[in-house]
Image (tube, rainbow, N blue to C red):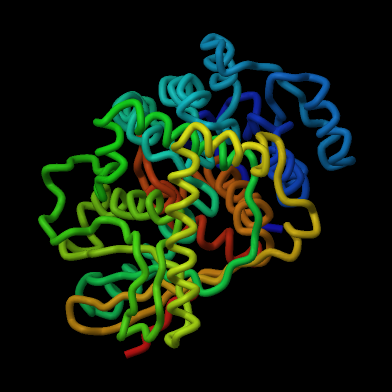
Amino acid sequence: MVGNARSIRGVSADREFDIVLFGASGFVGRLCAEYLATAATPEARIALAGRSSSRLAAVKDALGPAAAAWPVLVADTGDADAMSDLAKRTRVVATTVGPYRLYGRSLAQACATEGTHYADLSGEVLFMRESIDSFDEAAQASGARIVHSCGFDSIPSDLGVLLLHEAVAADGEGTLGETTFVVRALRGGVSGGTIASLKSTLDAARSDGRLAQLLLDPYALSPDRDQEPRLTSEQDMTRPERDDELDMWLAPFVMGRINTRVVRRSNALADWAYGREFRYREVMGFSSGPLGAVQAGGLAAGIGALELGLSTGPVRSVLDKVLPSPGQGPGKRMRERGFFRIDIHTRTSTGARYVCQVAAKGDPGYKATAVMFGQAGLCLAFDSDALPKRAGVLTPATAMGDVLVARLRAAGQTFDVQRIS
């Protein structure tokens, strides 16, 4: 169990609750509630919140004695007053209710206004951009840390690159240059909530050309777009390619379109400490031979076909019959058998090479994410004095950084940096 000694200073120290888990009766929310019931100390004041008291009560009952004292709070995202009241009562809100662009705005706004730390699992670039534009100033004024993407989107990416930067700086090897996040192994499923978020984003882009262009911008989440480095194209990979230095075939990684934006925002918020020539991409890695080429080509084609299908009315109707609906997701056996292993390679401005391995057991988007999300909530609630002295709409690296890394390592996840040349 990771410790969570109470901070007597910091934002919201005198609130009724330490953490309110909002959306606790949803598919991912239940998994996060189960994790908190095992990971939080008995002194942690946790409440379960959502729209249905009966469903929340059922979740609470299933958690057993560890959650016996956890209150159930009924609130709806459509009620701005209820969201404000919820934010006022707790030090941290951890929300799993998406698609966030449809259902997350009022809660994020309430937390930014009331000085309440906030964490979510958003993989929605459009929502995060709107949050930055609308709530960053208020959150800085109130002292709130508004932290999006606190799961498999985008903690392995964001914290892994941070650790590379720290190792390179400590060795005096300059700054990060070409940096490639490679998924080497992954087993997991997909939930209806993830599909719903993807469809919501595609619908918004299809209806508004400006939003479509924003999604294509590699610096879509930058705090100051005009200050970003003028590098050659950093557009997301759409076709397979062979990388001779890594000695493998590469294909697009579907989550790279979110994670890369988050990592670049971290660099900008840190005054481009990773480097002005920092170039970052995320890919799936396959073997260097003919089979790897076929696998990479097949994956690239499959991702393109899925996005095209979800953007086309008649095809979407067919896909809706076979893809999971909101509230559905991989079963317990699949969640337990899942895993991921990621290698993040970088070549520094001095020519040195490093790699950060990030790995965990459990389905990446569900069991492993429940650990990441739960520890992020505990970190925001109990480690305030040790966290970077920042407020506003942040990233996992800029809001929690090494403190969250330590928690995740203690919880059994791997974050390991090595110099390779």
Residue drawn 22% across the image and 71% down it: 177
User: Relative to 201, does residue 268 appear above or below in the rendering?
Assistant: below
Q: Is residue 73 left or right of residue 241?
A: right
Which corner quadrant holds the C terminus? bottom left
Q: Position of residue 200 (x, y in %)?
A: 47, 32
Hey, which quadrant is residue 211 in on the image? top left
- Confirm whether residue 46 shows in the render: no
Residue drawn 20% across the image and 64% down it: 275
Residues 6 and 312: in front is 312
User: Relative to 40, does residue 74 appear above or below in the rendering?
Assistant: above
Q: Position of residue 331 (x, y in %)?
A: 78, 51
Q: Is residue 72 left or right of residue 326?
A: right
The image shows a total of numbered marks equal to: 0
Residues 164 and 222: in front is 222
Q: Position of residue 127 (x, y in %)?
A: 40, 32
Q: Position of residue 250 (x, y in %)?
A: 39, 73
Residue drawn 65% across the image and 50% down it: 370
Q: Is residue 123 left or right of residue 263?
A: right
Q: Is residue 179 left or right of residue 32?
A: left
Hey, which quadrant is residue 3 in on the image? bottom right
Residue drawn 51% across the image and 69% down it: 358
